Amino acid sequence: MNELIRFLKFLYRKKLVLILVPLAAVIAGFFLIRRLPDHYRSQGRIATGLVDKTEQILASGKDAEQESEINRKFDNLIQLMRLRNVIDQVSYRLILHDLTVQGDSLFKPQGKQLQSLGREEKAGLIALYKKKYTLREGLSIWDAREKEARQILEESGYSPEAILDKLTIYRLQNSDYINIEFEGTHPQLTAFVINTLCEEFLSIYADRLRESNNRSLDFLEKFMLQKLDALNGRMEELKQFKIRNRVLNLNEQARSLYGHIIDFETKREIAKKDVAAYGSALKNIDDKFNPADRKYLENSMASINQNIAATREQLRQVNDTYIRSNFNPAYKARVDSLQQVLALKIGESTDKYIYNPLVAKENLVSRKLDLEISLELSENSIQTIESEIARLNRKFDGMVPNEASIQQFETGIDIAGKEYIEALQRYNNARLESNYPITLKQVERAMPGLPQPSKKLLLVAMCGIASLVFCLFVLFVLYYFDHSIWSPAQLADRTGIPVLGKLSRTGRAVNFLDPDDSAAPPDEVHRLKNQLRSLRYEIDEEIYGPRIISFTSLKPVTDRVHVVYGLAWAYAKVNQRVLIIDGNFNAPAITAAQGSWLMEDYFTDRNMEIESDQPGSVQVLGTRGGDVSLLEIADERLIQQKLARLREQFDVILIEADSLQSMNRAKEWITYSDRVAVVFEAGHAIGPRDEPSLKYLRSRGAMLSGWILTNAGNLSSGG
């Protein structure tokens, strides 16, 4: 806080600099800025369709985009509008406009380089600009002709850098619109730049979008055809596999085959049951015949049985065929026919009484024959059914690998079909989107710009403010590196020695011992008197009775004389008898001004006495000066006797000693003094060379009263 106050006081001392420099800058800025041309500003607007979807023909079906994604798209569009390729097109249009029109239609006066070109050179320049505009190329700095064309653009103020410097592009809050503003020195120029920029940007954007859509369509079409070829290849593989393995409908075939197996197994169980039943019935019938009857019967029916056996063999073969044909009804009629034939032959054997007539067992014989035929048929059926079941099982087992292969083919076809459908859908969507017009369009064309509020006063004010800030910066640097002391607090902090008080700076030095010296203003004299009274009080607080006070300084200054004069006046005002001794042999200013007794005479003449007047008087003991010191005038004992005599004659003895630069002369006076006060003139610094003197002063201990700061500012704390 103290440093800030000191800095403000430092600025107060430099107030003329802080006033005159900004004032000069303001005046110079006014004469320079008043010739600046007026400025105009136009604006246009582009709708993007990123937020407002009303222009879309079909909904995209996408989820709502996040605000961050929308902001990213707006940033991309804005950066695309600021691309060098787009701005170059605007530059070409501007320079071609000025090259092809005359008179007041020019946006800017032609530069010296453009005016120096001949008609043919201008025609070649126009052709070059048109070529670059058509090809959408920039000017190369390596080609001499194009480098010259680039320099003409820069001279005319139509370079891409100059346009971008005055161009402002931003999104209008959170809306769907991009605002474009341009500031220039011609109202038609500002509108032309914005409208041309919009046209070129929309054209380049449409071409880029069209090119991107075409690349996407080509890629998606190839991708879709690849997926279609993959799907057709999978289907062809399945087709060839079915042809090679004679597969029509594997699921139906497997289902039918499995059903046949189940049917045959059921019939086999029925046949086994019939065999068991027929065998049991035959056994019961055989048990009813004795061996003699069976022998007679077998001999009697030998021929008939041969016929029956032949018929039974035919019946067995047909029945076997009937079973193998999966019980085809066509074979069933033949089986029934053979069974009828067999029944007739059995009946014939019964009619001829080929059995023992003594035994009435013809029904049993007939029944036995029927059962034997049925048993034989059932046994044959079991064999045929089991062989057929085995064949069907082998055929069913052969279908399992085909089923696995077909499932693999069908899975591949399903995946390929889904990929093809997805590729086809993406291709169709891309084709639909490519047929839509771009959603970007200029919804507000720029009109000739209106004059902008003049910034000349603002620029003049900025000149003053900038110069003031510069002055403050320079003064701060000077203050930072300036170690000058201006206030009692600074002096005490720097040296560690207390400060008795200060004496303010006056317009003219005041000699209080000369009653006719009244040239200084009364208020300054009054302030100085109060400060001298304060110094007298501070000194009297430390010592009472007759005292000898020496006044010295770090460097030779004239302020010691004024301090001595002022304190002599202050002590005289309180009825003290005051003696001033001019102890400065190098510059005896007090002796030259007052004229009085000389110390050389007083210290060498043992009988010489200096008598004081009434209380409140001031006497002066001068010196001849020269290259001499106190102890060279008289010996130490005599000096002590003379000074003791002066103590009896005067209440206060003030010695104006030499500076501490002549260390021995000042020390001699300080040795015979009761107190020593050091005078320091404000505005001076304490450097490394003053350290020995400060060290000596600190060694004086209680004898050192402190500093007296002279020539201080009028502020409360100095400075």
Image (spheres, rainbow, N blue to C red):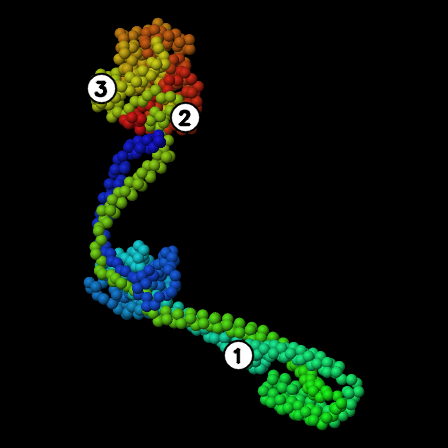
Which label is found at residue 621?
Answer: none
Q: Residue at 61%, 78% (x, y): give it.
A: 263
Q: CA distance from mark 1 to mark 3?
A: 132 Å
Q: Which residue is mark 1?
A: 236
Report which quarter residue 307 is drawn in.
bottom right
In the figure, 303 relative to 499: above or below? below
Q: Residue furthest top?
A: 607
Question: Is the Cβ of the residue at disc 1 closer than 8 Å to that at disc 3?
Answer: no
Q: Residues within 10 Å of mark 2 (few under 14, many from 20)?
A: some
> Can you give x and y, in whole percent of width and height, for residue 542 in the image?
36, 14
Q: CA distance from mark 1 to mark 2?
A: 111 Å
> Can you give x and y, in whole percent of width and height, for residue 660 in the image?
39, 21
Q: Which residue is mark 3?
A: 517
In the figure, 262 relative to 648: above or below? below
> Can you give x and y, in whole percent of width and height, for residue 627 in the image?
38, 19
User: Which badge, 1 or 2, is on the more N-terminal residue?
Assistant: 1
Q: Which residue is mark 2?
A: 690
Amino acid type, callout 3? Asp
Q: Residue at 50%, 75% (x, y): give it.
A: 231
Amino acid type, callout 1? Glu
Taking depth in this image into account, of 265 and 560 the one nearest to the observer is 265
